[in-house]
Amino acid sequence: MSRFNYMSDDYLSTVFADESFTCDCCKKISNAKYIGPQYSTADNDASLCPDCIQTGEAVQSGLVDFFNEIDPECVDENVSSEISCRTPGIFTWQDQEWATHCNDACEYHGDATAQDIIKADEKTIQIWMERYDQSRNDWDTFMSGYQPGGDQGVYKFSCKHCNAIILNWDFS
């Protein structure tokens, strides 16, 4: 399967199924079918292969959009284009802005685990507090009893340069 620069292999295994099908974009037979989030005006989701997503053909063709938003002031145009046009979508409650750190997009890992929250270091907590204008007491309150898949979404990203963990926060 194609390698996506800003997605962990673990997450990719949740959005691609081992299934033989004909891609709606390139019309070729593929053995990896995209089953992740996508937006389109069609009644049914497009059946897409990883190559059409990675090359940007799936978005350029008008079949889908992934709504991967990223602050263009935090990364260069090539990275912004890769995230918005050549990277599979992410499951969130609301549309989320892709995490950035060290002037680059971070790698997406999916929902944070309860252990990710319990073991969060001070740097991770500090980044979260600054990003959401919250206090340490707010962290303790909101993250107490966190479980993936609940009404509160916490999405794990890691910086590709300094390995900082960035947690995006969301509510149903």
Image: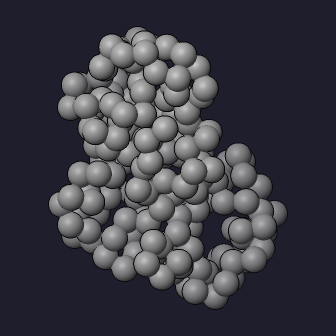
Give the answer, above or below, for where 88 lies relative to 24: below
Instruction: Place residue 63 in its image quadrant.
Output: top left
Q: Residue at x 41, y 24 (%)?
A: 48
Position of 114 with respect to 156 (left or right) is: right
Query: Which sits in the foreground, 153 or 155?
Result: 155
> Residue at 49% of width from left, 14% of height from top?
21
User: Colour scheme of this structure image?
Assistant: one colour
Residue 55's x, y, as percent? 28, 39
Number of marks: 0
- Up-down relation of residue 26 to residue 91 (above or below): above
> Is residue 121 shown left or right of residue 163?
right
Check the image and name the residue furthest to the right. 145
Q: Does the rendering let one see residue 93?
A: no
Q: Residue furthest left?
A: 77
Task: Residue 107 in the image: state x and y as whole percent.
Answer: 48, 62
Relative to 3, 8 lies left or right: right
